[in-house]
């Protein structure tokens, strides 16, 4: 399907919706307790959307050679179906052995699941893209820590179906995209805000607090990873500590739209439940902030790095240390006054989950499974793994992330909700990992008047400063004199651009209604997820349906559609695909097998 603005594809698909609704009766029947507010009218048979929002992976980092895996001895084997469609990856592009970067791409073995995290700063990612040449990753976004090669080459590395086996099996049996992008350049907070609102330019940097609110602030555009203001388990400890750079977002998010339409929803995050409750004053201010101290030993079953990286000592540095489950700057709804649960209050009951109550739609991951077990699954659920399972290099890894992902999807496929559920797997940013595809220019006029970061014309803001830097030093973005793609973020000032689209990310849709073994080439971004939710439940745009200034509206207005990843005209495939959460292989009669 051709990429088009949301309003256009909402209108264009009216005919599709009319035929689709006729097919709802063919879906599996459900127990009486599986309805709830999810029974609100929808444009498709999908009544439940579950978004698994992972961390820090580029498309080529996981799918560089898909569907061909190396299949060495002692790693889970993967053999693709003969009709698997081609994807735009390093093999197809001829860049696996003839790459313009300083180092060539190479495969990481399953034993190398642990790596250091790469540089995923807003400007450094732009420098790596180098105006669309994509040839400065080693210089701009490489890191050299434990688990990464000392020559900067690890930023070019990729895994195949012997490590990210579950994702490759899901791609074989459901739908994936090879043309989906980070809405903007930058790290986690930028990504989660775009997932929830398509807007990062309406932020307030908190200066002082009063009565449980932000009292004074500076306007900013989010380009980094500030914690949400007033989160007890974040940097400002519920507003009891100043000068921590925390921010609050103005405007609405998808949770606000769902509340207005009386649609159940929730954000579920590992470690959100406090290990010590908050003490709150009568005026709402924090007396003693809640503590989110739950932790797990990181990288279970993953070996320590070897001497290959050149950084380890003898014996190698032990990676199996405690990782705090909760990460405040990943908790997207905490950034908005209307949808935050700043004191991490627990839901009054399982029946509250997804609905208004003390938790204000922000929950622990254990609450998602409790709601699922009780037949109280919200219509829209956003899932964030505890930090040791969120796939973020350094604190997590692909194998730990696979365990979380498979456990969630197995549970959903065994539930009575599966017949009308769509699981969307997407990511917050690329971590700086190499990807050979540049995102299209969709927001070239996002500068405030008179602030074009050195460009001669605001509309030319994507033209980097010339000449391009000849620097060949690994992991030294400061030596690269080019402005990147959009220019510098001006210290996070309100005039900074909302630069997009950014790097390419994995995106999968797992549902009985997915097109099997299908690859979408439609241009989409992180805000395409909420665009689907808006379409499916008949919601308005985040910033309303009226006109907005060019380049200043929420990205859901221009988001590409994911509808081509579904087949609503055929009978749903309600046969579950149960995987082994350790190997990622398909389970056959209780034993692991491969497709």
Image (cartoon, helix red, strand yellow):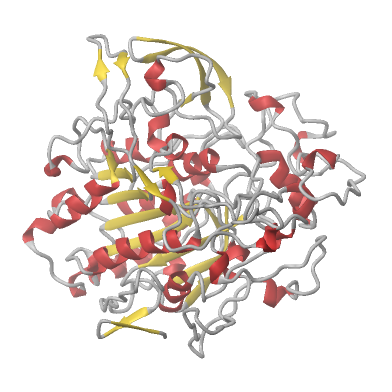
Q: Residue at x 56, y 20 (%)?
A: 219
- Residue 363 coordinates in the image, percent (x, y): 27, 40
Residue 437 seen in render: no
Residue 449 seen in render: yes
Image check: 559 left or right of 213? right
Image check: 573 left or right of 4? left
Q: Residue at x 12, y 43 (%)?
A: 351
Q: Residue at x 26, y 40 (%)?
A: 261
Image quadrant containing the C terminus:
bottom left
Rendered view: 92 above or below 293: below
Q: Residue at x 37, y 20 (%)?
A: 238
Q: Which of 306/34 is in front?
A: 306
Residue at the outermost front position: 314
- Residue 215 coordinates in the image, percent (x, y): 43, 10
Q: Which of 152/303 is in front?
A: 303
- Residue 572 coordinates in the image, percent (x, y): 28, 76
């Amino acid at each position: 399907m051709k990429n088009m603005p949301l309003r256009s594809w909402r209108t264009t698909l009216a005919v599709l919706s009319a035929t689709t609704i006729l097919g709802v009766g063919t879906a599996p029947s459900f127990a009486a307790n599986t309805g709830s507010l999810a029974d609100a009218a929808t444009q498709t048979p999908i009544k439940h959307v579950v978004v698994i929002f992972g961390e820090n992976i580029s498309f080529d980092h996981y799918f560089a050679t898909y569907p061909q895996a190396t299949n060495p001895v002692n790693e889970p084997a993967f053999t693709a179906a003969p009709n698997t469609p081609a994807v735009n990856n390093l093999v197809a592009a001829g860049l696996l052995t003839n790459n313009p970067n300083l180092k060539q791409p190479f495969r990481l073995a399953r034993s190398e699941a642990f790596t250091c995290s790469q540089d995923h700063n807003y400007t450094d990612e732009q420098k790596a893209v180098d105006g669309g040449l994509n040839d400065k990753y080693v210089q701009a976004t490489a890191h050299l820590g434990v688990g990464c090669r000392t020559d900067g080459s690890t930023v070019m590395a990729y895994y195949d179906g012997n490590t990210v086996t579950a994702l490759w099996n899901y791609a074989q049996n459901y739908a994936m995209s090879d043309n989906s992008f980070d809405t903007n350049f930058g790290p986690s907070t930028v990504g989660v805000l775009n997932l929830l609102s398509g807007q990062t330019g309406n932020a307030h940097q908190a200066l002082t607090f009063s009565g449980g609110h932000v009292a004074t602030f500076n306007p900013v555009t989010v380009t980094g990873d500030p914690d949400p203001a007033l989160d007890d388990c974040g940097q400002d400890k519920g507003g009891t500590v100043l000068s921590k750079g925390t921010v609050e977002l103005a405007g609405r998010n998808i949770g606000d739209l769902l509340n207005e339409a009386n649609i159940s929803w929730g954000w579920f995050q590992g470690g959100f439940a406090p290990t010590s409750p908050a003490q709150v004053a009568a005026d709402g201010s924090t007396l003693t902030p809640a503590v989110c101290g739950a932790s797990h030993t990181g990288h279970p079953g993953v070996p320590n790095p070897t001497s290959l990286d050149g950084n380890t000592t003898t014996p190698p540095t032990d990676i199996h240390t405690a990782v705090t489950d909760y990460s405040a700057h990943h908790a997207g709804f905490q950034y908005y006054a209307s949808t935050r649960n700043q004191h991490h209050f627990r839901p009054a009951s399982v029946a509250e989950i997804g609905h208004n109550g003390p938790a204000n739609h922000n929950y622990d991951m254990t609450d998602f499974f409790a709601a699922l077990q009780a037949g109280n699954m919200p219509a829209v659920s956003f899932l964030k793994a505890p930090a040791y399972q969120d796939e973020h290099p350094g604190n997590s890894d692909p194998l730990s992330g696979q365990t979380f992902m498979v456990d969630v999807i197995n549970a959903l496929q065994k539930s009575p909700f599966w017949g009308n559920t769509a699981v969307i797997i997407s990511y917050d940013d690329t971590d700086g990992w190499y990807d050979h595809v540049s995102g299209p220019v969709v927001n070239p006029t996002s500068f405030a008047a008179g602030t074009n970061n050195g460009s001669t014309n605001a509309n030319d803001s994507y033209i980097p400063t010339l000449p391009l830097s000849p620097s060949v030093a690994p992991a030294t973005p400061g030596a690269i004199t080019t402005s990147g793609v959009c220019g510098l973020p001006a210290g996070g000032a309100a005039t900074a651009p909302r630069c997009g689209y950014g790097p390419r990310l994995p995106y999968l849709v797992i549902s009985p209604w997915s097109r099997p073994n299908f690859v979408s080439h439609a241009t989409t971004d992180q805000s395409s997820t909420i665009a689907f939710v808006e379409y499916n439940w008949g919601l308005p745009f985040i910033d309303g349906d009226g006109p907005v200034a060019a380049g200043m509206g929420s990205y859901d207005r221009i988001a590409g559609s994911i509808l081509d990843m579904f087949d609503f005209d055929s009978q749903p495939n309600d046969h579950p695909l149960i995987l082994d959460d350790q190997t990622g292989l398909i389970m056959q009669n209780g034993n692991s097998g491969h497709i």
